[in-house]
Amino acid sequence: SQTMETIGSLATNIAHDLNNYIQPIHVFSQLGEEMIKSNQLNLSTILEYFGKIRSGANNARDMIHRIIKYSNNKVENVVTKVDISNII
């Protein structure tokens, strides 16, 4: 059905976006770990990596908050058909 295709497409887009936000977290944490293990303690580079890790985490968090906010708005804005003939 069209609804399932739409949900599948939405889920794919969300997963793709989330992966884009998580990728720098993975890459820069790995690079920082390698620098520390090899005793190449370049403080400014490690701090730069932390900044990129934080940025990726913030972007992922913001996206999740937007999804939650959108989801909550959809639940609150549901229109229900009411039969008022019994009330009148």
Image (tube, rainbow, N blue to C red):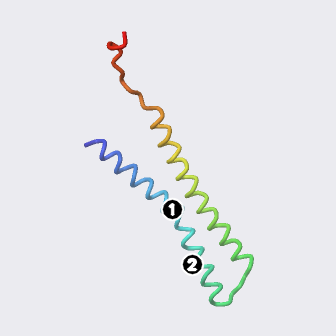
Q: Name the residue under label 2.
A: 30
Percent position of residue 5, x then y:
31, 47
What's the amino acid at mark 1? Asn
Q: Which residue is at the far right?
A: 44
Q: Nearer the viewer, residue 5 or 74?
A: 74
**Quarter occupied by residue 57:** bottom right
Percent position of residue 19, x then y:
48, 62
Q: Is mark 2 on a helix, strand or loop?
A: helix
Give the position of the N terminus as an image quadrant.
Answer: top left
Q: In this view, does 84 lie to the left or right of 36?
A: left
Whether label 1 touches label 2, CB < 8 Å? no
Q: In this view, does 64 lie to the left or right of 5?
A: right
Q: Residues within 10 Å of mark 1 (few under 14, many from 20)?
A: some
Q: Mark 1 points at which residue?
A: 20
Q: Which residue is at the far front?
A: 87
> In the figure, 10 relative to 16: above or below?
above
Mark earlier in primary sequence (1, 2): 1
Per the model, the C-alpha gap separating discs 1 and 2 is 16 Å
Which residue is depicted at the point 74% across and 79% down?
A: 43
What's the amino acid at mark 2? Gln
